[in-house]
């Protein structure tokens, strides 16, 4: 599966994309294409603005709603906005569940969401909060008809912030991070995608620690989409597991990876005996 994308379209239920952009004019164009595809697929489409004080939803029924008036520093929906629902950013997973179920009950094929999270992730605390929320959204999308594109303005919040967020998505625009940690199932299982070496091992540790409160005490880590992982990266997984007091079982690992786990004598990482 292609996980590093060049276009926001071609999306289907279950897709959860980190989409960086440069300026709202560029994002508005992406939004129109993404929204048009959702409307054509008979999905309920919503724009969600995430801020430190709340979560605001607007239902989009026409691509012509998307615009950027000169006096607004944000992506907005013109003319026909409906009253927004406001709630804590941490309530996003439960709110998307409510909206998805309501959409299906109303005859839609699912829910398609476009977000703007820049106001929240400008601070370290906001970024940590949202990364954990992103992981829970990803877990939910595994087996629900939710399609979500998370928008990050790299010129506003910086490449490092976007890279940290990208690491917990299953799909991203380009490769700001050489690896991704995604939800593998609804029970807390994880999957590692891409390449991890000495240069990115600390970032892998950071990604696991960021979602750590949501990781079960015994967790599987699917390695079937890993192209390369070295000993320092496996040690980073072991350190994170120790800090979080969890046991990680690698599944689908290559023979060399299994050999490294046993040779290094890792205490909190094991391989699947199958």
Image (cartoon, helix red, strand yellow):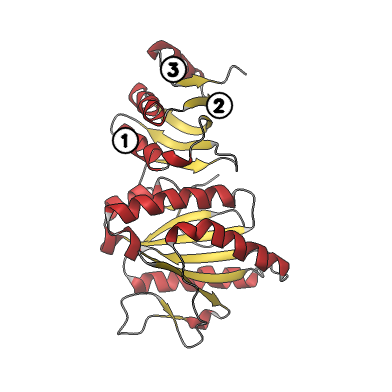
Q: Which numbered dot is residue 261?
A: 3
Which quarter of the picture shows residue 116? bottom left
The 10 Å Cα crowd at callout 2, few under 14, some 14 to 19, many 20 or more, is some
Is 174 placed left or right of 43 in the picture?
left
**Pointer 1 residue:** 200
| Marked residue nearer the N-terminal end (2 or 3) | 2
| Marked residue nearer the N-terminal end (3 or 1) | 1
| Residue found 38% across the figure and 48% down from its top | 175
**Pointer 2 residue:** 251
**Residue 226 location in percent, x, y?**
47, 32
Q: Is residue 176 above or below residue 105?
A: above
Q: In this view, does 112 lie above or below 195?
A: below
How far apart are labels 1 and 2 at the CA level?
Answer: 21 Å
Q: Which of 258 and 87 is in front in this view?
A: 87
**Residue 88 location in percent, x, y?**
44, 63
**Residue 35 location in percent, x, y?**
54, 71
Is 258 placed left or right of 140 in the picture?
left
Which quarter of the picture shows residue 38? bottom right
Is mark 2 in CB contact (under 8 Å) with mark 3? no
| Marked residue nearer the N-terminal end (1 or 2) | 1
Quarter of the image for the C terminus: give it. Answer: top right
How far apart are labels 3 and 1 at the CA level?
Answer: 18 Å
Q: Work out whether residue 12 can be spotted.
A: no
| Residue found 30% across the figure and 53% down from its top | 125
Is mark 3 in CB contact (under 8 Å) with mark 1? no
Q: Work out whether residue 266 can be spotted.
A: yes
**SS for tag 1?**
loop
Q: Nearer the viewer, residue 48 or 179?
A: 48
Q: Is residue 266 above or below residue 39?
A: above
| Residue found 49% across the figure and 76% down from its top | 84
Q: Is residue 197 above or below residue 6?
A: above
């Amino acid at each position: 599966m292609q996980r590093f994308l060049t276009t926001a379209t071609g999306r289907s239920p279950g897709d959860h994309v980190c989409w960086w952009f440069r300026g709202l004019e560029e994002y508005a164009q992406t939004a129109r294409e993404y929204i048009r595809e959702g409307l054509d697929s008979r999905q309920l489409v919503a724009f969600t603005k995430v801020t430190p004080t709340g979560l605001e939803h607007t239902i989009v029924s026409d691509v012509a709603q998307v615009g950027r008036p000169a006096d607004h520093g944000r992506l907005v929906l013109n003319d026909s906005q409906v009253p927004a629902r406001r709630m804590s950013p941490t309530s996003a997973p439960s709110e998307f569940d409510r909206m998805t179920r309501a959409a299906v009950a109303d005859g839609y094929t699912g829910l398609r969401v476009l977000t703007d999270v820049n106001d929240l992730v400008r601070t370290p605390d906001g970024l940590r909060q949202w990364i954990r929320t992103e992981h829970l959204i990803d877990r939910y999308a595994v087996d629900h008809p939710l399609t979500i594109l998370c928008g990050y303005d790299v010129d506003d919040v910086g490449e490092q912030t976007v890279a940290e967020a990208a690491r917990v998505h299953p799909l991203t625009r380009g490769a700001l991070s050489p690896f991704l940690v995604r939800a593998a199932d609804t029970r807390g299982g994880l999957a590692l995608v891409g390449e991890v070496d000495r240069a990115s091992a600390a970032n892998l540790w950071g990604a696991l620690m960021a979602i750590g409160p949501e990781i079960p005490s015994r967790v599987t880590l699917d390695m079937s989409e890993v192209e390369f992982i070295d000993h320092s990266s496996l040690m980073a997984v072991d350190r994170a597991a120790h800090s979080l007091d969890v046991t990680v079982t690698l599944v689908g690992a290559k023979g060399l990876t299994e050999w490294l786990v046993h040779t290094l004598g890792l205490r909190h990482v094991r391989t699947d005996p199958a």
